[in-house]
């Protein structure tokens, strides 16, 4: 709530300015908005798309930022070189105290601007090209098959949590394998990463798990310095660390970024995909009959649910005009990709899940847009396609063990996700 404080006013102009500023603080709604139920996007987005597509919101620390909700404006924000992704710039919109602390650390490419951003991103990007990921598909398929076989061995009459048995280990084992984590450590690291990010651990436990992961990667970097192999950490060591292009801590932070950046999102997209199919039984029946529909199911899934919607934030380096508003240098901008994915100008009947939807030239924004677009998009798509072309073939009688309205979703003001999903078959 806005509390008025006494102010010293020097001139008529400053009276006007001060009143305007006060009015905007008093009326700017608090952000993040809450989802009304389940995985549904906040209702405020639809309203703002109609009435005020570039508007101000109030953040947790009382500061303000611009919220951009239309697809075309979001694309323009995410490609505008006059905006910065450097979190240590004053005015960068942080969404919680943890973010403000994280912003003080040495950045990796996710928080860099050109030219440094591409210089660092290109150190890992070659391992995530479409061709590279296509070559990995048999390995991803084998991982999913093995995890499903282990889950099936456990029975099926009593409920098992498919998050723990399939979604979490699929997402984790694949990226850890790319990094070069030995197979024997996969389970342990997966547990630590889950404690770090699942929100149900205490702050101390989460921070200990974070440190544990960093220490682990530090040791792995040292091992690869002594004896390089053919994994991502070895690539960083041989091509960047040894010739002196980066420091040891950069190699650790970059490997850590790849380990954590998409992990929770990946897990949540698998979970959301399973629930979406149960919510749309005729499309589930079609997918069971024809698993080659998986890519178009995944395409629509990544439009309908935006499980990483808070990363697309920027701060203005100079004054810019957007949607008839002036965004001043030093003001923060939140590009609401979750809203852009439901913009009826681009996606007719946006709130209907339809894997047969005709696609235009504009893409959905689930993986971002522009230079910071997800570096691992092809990997994420391949994992989702393989999970959804396999799961219901192996388990055609898979059912949720709880009613749809009792599914445990993430905190309604955080990125959409599902924490637990009991199933039987
Ligand atoms: C379905 C799963 C995924 C979704 C929906 C997703 C979504 C996103 C989004 C929206 C961004 C853009 C952020 C921005 O503009 O600031 C992004 C960037 C990024 N993602 Fe993903 N991601 C997924 C999976 C992954 C995976 C599996 C990894 C790691 C292996 C990963 C690593 C990254 C990295 C490192 C960036 C930063 C790219 C840059 O700044 O240049 N993501 N992702």
Image (cartoon, rainbow, N blue to C red):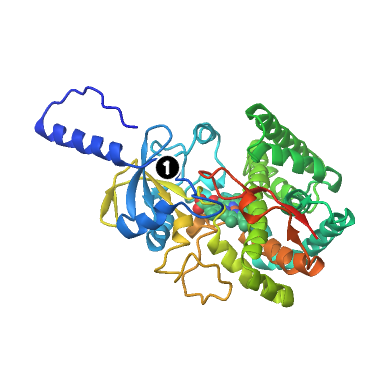
Residue 314 is situated, as x and y percent measured from the top left of the image, at 42, 47
Left or right of residue 309: residue 18: left
On screen, residue 261 versus residue 55, left or right, reads right
Q: Which residue lies furthest to the right in this view?
A: 153
Q: In which quarter of the image is residue 321?
A: bottom left
To which quarter of the image does residue 146 belong?
A: bottom right
> What is the tally of numbered marks visible in this picture?
1
Is 384 located above or below residue 401 in the figure? below
Q: Which of 24 and 186 is in front in this view?
A: 24
Quarter of the rendering occupied by the C terminus: bottom right
- Say which residue label 1 marks: 31
Q: Which residue lies furthest to the left in this view?
A: 12
Residue 169 x %, y %: 76, 51
Q: Is residue 198 left or right of residue 54?
A: right
Q: Residue 372: in sight, yes or no?
A: yes
Q: Which of 263 and 158 is in front in this view?
A: 158
Ligand 1 within 8 Å of the CB at mark 1: no
Which residue appears at 29% of the width and 44% of the height?
Answer: 328
Q: Is mark 1 on a helix, strand or loop?
A: loop
Residue 255: where, in percent of width, then height? 68, 45
72 sits to left or right of 101:
left
- x and y percent of residue 148 in the render? 82, 59
Q: Can residue 118 be spotted in the picture? A: no
User: Against 144, is 354 above or below?
Assistant: below
Within 10 Å of the Cα at label 1, are there few (<14), some (14-19), or many (20+) other Cα atoms? some
């Amino acid at each position: 709530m806005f509390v008025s404080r006494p102010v010293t006013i020097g001139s008529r102009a400053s009276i006007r300015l001060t009143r305007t500023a006060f009015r905007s603080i008093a009326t700017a709604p608090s952000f993040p908005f809450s989802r009304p139920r389940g995985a549904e996007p906040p209702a405020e987005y639809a309203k703002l798309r109609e009435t005020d597509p570039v508007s101000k919101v109030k953040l947790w620390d009382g500061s303000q930022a611009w919220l951009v909700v239309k697809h075309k404006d979001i694309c323009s924000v995410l490609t505008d070189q006059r905006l910065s992704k450097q979190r240590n710039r004053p005015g960068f919109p942080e969404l919680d105290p943890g973010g403000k602390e994280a912003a003080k650390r040495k950045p990796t490419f996710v928080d860099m601007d050109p030219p440094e951003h591409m210089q660092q991103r290109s150190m890992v990007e070659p391992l995530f090209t479409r061709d590279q990921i296509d070559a990995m598909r048999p390995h991803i398929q084998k991982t999913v098959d093995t995890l499903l076989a282990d889950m099936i061995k456990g029975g099926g009459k009593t409920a098992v949590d498919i998050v723990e048995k399939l979604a979490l280990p699929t997402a984790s084992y694949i990226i850890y394998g790319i990094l070069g984590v030995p197979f024997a450590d996969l389970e342990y690291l997966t547990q630590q990463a889950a404690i770090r990010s699942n929100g149900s651990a205490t702050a101390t436990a989460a921070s200990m798990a974070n440190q544990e992961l960093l220490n682990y990667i530090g040791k792995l970097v040292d091992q690869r310095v002594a004896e390089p192999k053919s994994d991502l950490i070895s690539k960083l060591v041989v091509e960047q660390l040894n010739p002196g292009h980066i420091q040891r801590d950069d190699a650790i932070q970059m490997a850590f970024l790849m380990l954590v950046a998409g992990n929770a999102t990946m897990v949540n997209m698998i979970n959301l995909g399973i629930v979406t199919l149960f919510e749309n039984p005729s499309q589930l029946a079609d997918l069971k009959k024809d698993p080659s529909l998986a890519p178009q199911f995944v395409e629509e899934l990544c439009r309908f649910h935006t499980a990483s919607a808070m990363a697309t934030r920027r701060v203005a380096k100079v004054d810019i005009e957007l949607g008839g508003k002036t965004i001043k240098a030093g003001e923060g901008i939140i590009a609401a990709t979750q809203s852009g994915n439901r913009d009826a100008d681009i996606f007719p009947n946006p709130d209907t899940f339809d894997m047969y939807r005709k696609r235009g030239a504009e893409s959905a924004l689930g993986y971002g847009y522009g230079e910071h677009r997800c570096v691992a998009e092809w990997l994420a798509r391949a994992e989702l396609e393989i999970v959804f072309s396999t799961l219901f073939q192996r388990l055609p009688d898979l059912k949720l063990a709880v009613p749809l309205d009792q599914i445990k979703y993430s905190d309604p003001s955080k990125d959409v996700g599902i924490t637990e999903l009991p199933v039987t078959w």
